[in-house]
């Protein structure tokens, strides 16, 4: 032990203070903003096929986000949370998981969902208010989008505990935003993870903004990764705009958890280039200069530069990939718009095995309102065609005939 003077003590305070523990938080980065390696790369970065797959997933995610925002702006989709600028985090996380692991996302992880087998149509269905979008065709045990901030962090502890009790070699990976680290849910889930040595990895997608609250006003902590220390959990940072770094760090921590080494926290430092959601106007609380500086270090351009320098990625490759992603998402949008909406009462069908009496009453009311609305629409159509509106007896007469 080393005796030191207590910080902030008066000059005359010569009492001995022993250091009983020390901690550090390390940052991983492999590519600088220009795509140039800053240190020896992990072996997987030499695999051109994998790197192109990661790049395509990031481009596809950005293309889907752009289409979703356009659909929302034209009244054909609900409020949407774009992941613009954060594609390396979501794709890098998903690429670090096995198929039978469980992803617990927040509401900006569509890149991870796509990588793991959620279809783009399902993503649009969810944001269009159709719960069928959460009935994934692919990762059946992955959790759906979590809108309440931070609540998935305690769910993740429960999932990981179940894995441990069943002695399954699986890992729960929970993604949360920087704002969620200020919630009690995160502290509770993290404490359980540490105390019970759960196979759980928390990935903090630190995009610098919790809606309109900047990172600097959320916490006095120098890093968010160090919040893990209080729970006895290792925490580290990664450059969230470097998909190689994200993949290496998260995969390493995931495999440690899978092998019985306990939980971990990875803080991915990135930036939210878009508004918080389509219901937000970020220009009210941050400057254009700040956003411009963030665009200069965004992840897709960084990886594109690396591919060009290290793997012979040419202009023709880029043109073909962008066109293919755009064509795929255009077809996805058409398929989504062609879906027949569920009836209004469907909103009640995924809440309880047996609806409580009050909700059953509301469901019956929704059915009646929908029937009345349909009848009004039919009458309007008949008038437009010059026919008389239907009367209450029309159905009975039709039945007698």
Image (cartoon, helix red, strand yellow):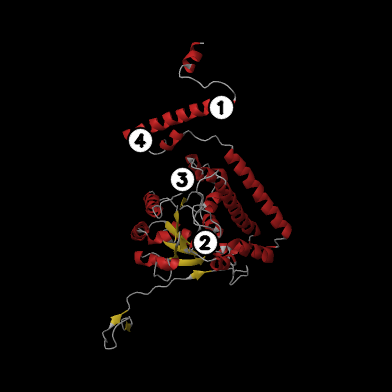
| Residue 148, position as x, y percentages in the image | 40, 51
Disc 4 + disc 1, Cβ < 8 Å: no
Q: Which residue is mark 1?
A: 381
Between marks 4 and 3 in the image, the one whose residue lies nearer the viewer: 4
Between marks 2 and 3 in the image, the one whose residue lies nearer the viewer: 2
| Residue 380, position as x, y percentages in the image | 54, 28
**Label 2, label 1: how far apart the Cα atoms are:** 44 Å
Crowding at dot 3, Cα within 10 Å, few <14 / some 14-19 / many 20+, comes out as some
Of the two numbered discs 2 and 1 on the same chain, state the one appearing first in sequence: 2
Q: Which residue is mark 4?
A: 359
Between marks 1 and 3 in the image, the one whose residue lies nearer the viewer: 1
**Label 4, label 1: how far apart the Cα atoms are:** 33 Å
**Label 4, label 3: how far apart the Cα atoms are:** 27 Å
Q: Secondary structure at mark 1?
A: helix
**Label 2, label 3: how far apart the Cα atoms are:** 38 Å
Of the two numbered discs 1 and 3 on the same chain, state the one appearing first in sequence: 3
Q: Which residue is mark 2?
A: 283
Left or right: where 345 falls relative to 73: left
Q: Secondary structure at mark 4?
A: helix
| Residue 336, position as x, y percentages in the image | 57, 40
Q: Nearer the viewer, residue 224 or 397?
A: 397
Q: Would you place residue 12 above or below residue 310 in this image? A: below
Q: Is residue 395 visible?
A: yes
**Label 2, label 4: how far apart the Cα atoms are:** 41 Å
Disc 2 + disc 1, Cβ < 8 Å: no
Of the two numbered discs 4 and 1 on the same chain, state the one appearing first in sequence: 4
């Amino acid at each position: 032990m080393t005796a030191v003077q207590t910080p902030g003590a008066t000059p005359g305070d010569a009492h001995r203070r022993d250091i009983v523990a020390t901690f550090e938080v390390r940052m991983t980065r492999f590519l600088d903003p220009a795509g140039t390696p800053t240190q020896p790369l992990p072996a997987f970065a030499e695999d051109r096929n994998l790197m192109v797959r990661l790049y395509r997933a990031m481009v596809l995610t950005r293309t889907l986000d752009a289409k979703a925002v356009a659909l929302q702006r034209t009244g054909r989709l609900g409020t949407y949370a774009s992941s613009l600028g954060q594609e390396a985090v979501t794709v890098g996380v998903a690429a670090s998981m096995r198929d039978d692991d469980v992803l617990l996302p927040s509401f900006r992880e569509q890149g991870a969902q796509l990588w793991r087998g959620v279809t783009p149509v399902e993503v649009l269905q969810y944001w269009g208010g159709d719960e069928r979008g959460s009935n994934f065709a692919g990762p059946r045990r992955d959790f759906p989008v979590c809108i309440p901030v931070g609540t998935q962090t305690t769910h993740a502890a429960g999932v990981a505990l179940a894995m441990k009790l069943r002695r399954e070699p699986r890992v729960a990976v929970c993604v949360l935003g920087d704002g969620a680290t200020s919630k009690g849910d995160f502290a509770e889930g993290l404490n359980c993870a540490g105390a019970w040595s759960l196979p759980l990895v928390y990935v903090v997608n630190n995009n610098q903004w919790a809606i309109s609250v900047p990172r600097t006003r959320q916490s006095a902590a120098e890093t968010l990764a160090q919040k893990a220390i209080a729970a006895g959990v290792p925490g580290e940072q990664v450059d969230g705009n470097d998909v190689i770094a994200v993949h290496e760090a998260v995969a390493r921590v995931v495999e440690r958890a899978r092998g019985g080494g306990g939980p971990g926290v990875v803080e991915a430092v990135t930036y939210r280039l878009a508004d918080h959601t389509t219901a937000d106007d970020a220009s009210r609380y941050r400057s254009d200069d700040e956003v411009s500086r963030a665009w200069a270090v965004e992840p897709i351009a960084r990886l594109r530069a690396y591919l060009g320098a290290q793997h012979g990625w040419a202009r023709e490759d880029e043109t073909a990939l962008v066109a293919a992603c755009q064509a795929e998402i255009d077809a996805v949008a058409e398929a989504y718009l062609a879906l027949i909406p569920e009836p209004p009462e469907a909103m009640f069908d995924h809440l309880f095995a047996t609806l409580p009496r009050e909700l059953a009453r509301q469901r019956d009311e929704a059915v009646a309102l929908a029937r009345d609305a349909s009848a009004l629409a039919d009458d309007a159509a008949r008038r437009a065609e010059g026919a008389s509106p239907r009367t209450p007896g029309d159905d009975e007469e039709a039945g007698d005939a």
